[in-house]
């Protein structure tokens, strides 16, 4: 995607939603870096969160959440064979996973996003914990997100995907796949990948 000038708010939101729904993670990452995150030289100043920077910080946190999701999904696609064999991914060996986790952790610690986006960040981090093999951390994050009480009525496709993934992980009961039993997560992930919804 070539560099582009600022998009209108409505057009930007529409483009972000389309990328998330259709699983265009590379496009989403570039879009976020170009449109939502401040230039690298000013990110440190924005992160300080001074009064004048509050709006930029909120925009930056939203961008960080989206960037984390894109990095996580790209990492999962790159490691599909490991996921198929139920091999946990590690931050040490997967820089994108590590970067995504850092973005999400910082966003949740600051707690400045709207509740809707805070919930999305928790769902994404729960998924990240799961692929690391940290089932308890994943379930804990889903509990914080309140997935049992989430309404999916009129929600966009990407949100339905996040919620569906959370319930599949929660319903799995254990990150260990028993021998001679099908890997439910992989089978489900393969089916949604065919529909360009993402990779779990």
Image: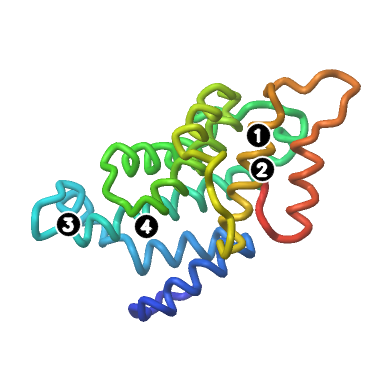
Q: Which residue is mark 3?
A: 54
Q: Are marks 4 and 1 in contact (CB under 8 Å)?
A: no
The reply, left or right, for residue 197 in relation to residue 26 is: right
Give the residue drawn at x 41%, y 75%.
3
State if disc 2 and disc 1 touch (CB < 8 Å). Answer: yes
Q: Position of residue 29 (x, y in %)?
A: 47, 59
Q: Nearer the viewer, residue 49 or 153?
A: 153
Disc 2 is placed on an element classified as: loop
Can you give x and y, in whole percent of width and height, for residue 146 in the image? 49, 39
Q: Nearer the viewer, mark 4 or mark 1?
A: 1
Disc 3 crowd rating (10 Å Cα; few below 14, some 14-19, many 20+) is some
Q: Residue at x 63, y 27 (%)?
A: 88
Image position, residue 96 (x, y; %): 49, 42
Of the residues under marks 1 and 2, which one precedes in the sequence? 1
How was the colour assigned to the protein in this rendering? rainbow
Q: Viewer-proximal residue, 190 or 45?
A: 190
Residue, disc 2: 200
Cβ–Cβ below 8 Å for labels 3 and 2? no
For label 4, the residue is 63
| 3D distance between C-alphas at marks 1 and 3 | 35 Å
Quarter location, residue 110: top left
Q: CA distance from mark 3 to mark 2?
A: 34 Å
Determine which of the numbered discs, if any, sits on residue 169 in the image: 1
Q: Secondary structure at mark 4?
A: helix
Q: Where in the figure is residue 9, as x and y percent of width and height?
A: 36, 76
Going from the N terminus, do you reach mark 4 or mark 1 first?
4
């Amino acid at each position: 995607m070539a560099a582009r000038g600022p998009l209108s708010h409505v057009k930007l939101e529409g483009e972000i939603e389309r990328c998330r729904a259709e699983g265009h993670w590379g496009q989403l990452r570039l879009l976020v870096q170009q449109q939502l995150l401040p230039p690298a030289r000013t990110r440190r100043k924005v992160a300080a969160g001074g009064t004048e920077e509050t709006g930029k910080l909120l925009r930056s946190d939203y961008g960080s959440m989206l960037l984390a999701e894109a990095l996580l999904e790209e990492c999962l696609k790159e490691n599909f064979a490991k996921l198929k064999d139920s091999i946990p991914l590690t931050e040490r060996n997967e820089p994108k996973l590590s970067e995504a986790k850092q973005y999400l952790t910082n966003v949740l610690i600051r707690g400045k996003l709207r509740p809707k986006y805070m919930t999305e960040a928790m769902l994404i981090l729960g998924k990240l914990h799961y692929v690391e093999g940290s089932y308890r951390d994943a379930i804990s994050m889903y509990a914080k997100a309140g997935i049992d009480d989430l309404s999916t009525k009129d929600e966009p496709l990407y949100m339905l995907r996040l919620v569906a993934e959370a319930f599949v992980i929660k319903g799995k009961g254990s990150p260990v796949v028993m021998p001679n039993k099908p890997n439910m997560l992989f089978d489900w992930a393969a089916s949604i990948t065919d529909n360009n919804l993402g990779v779990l």
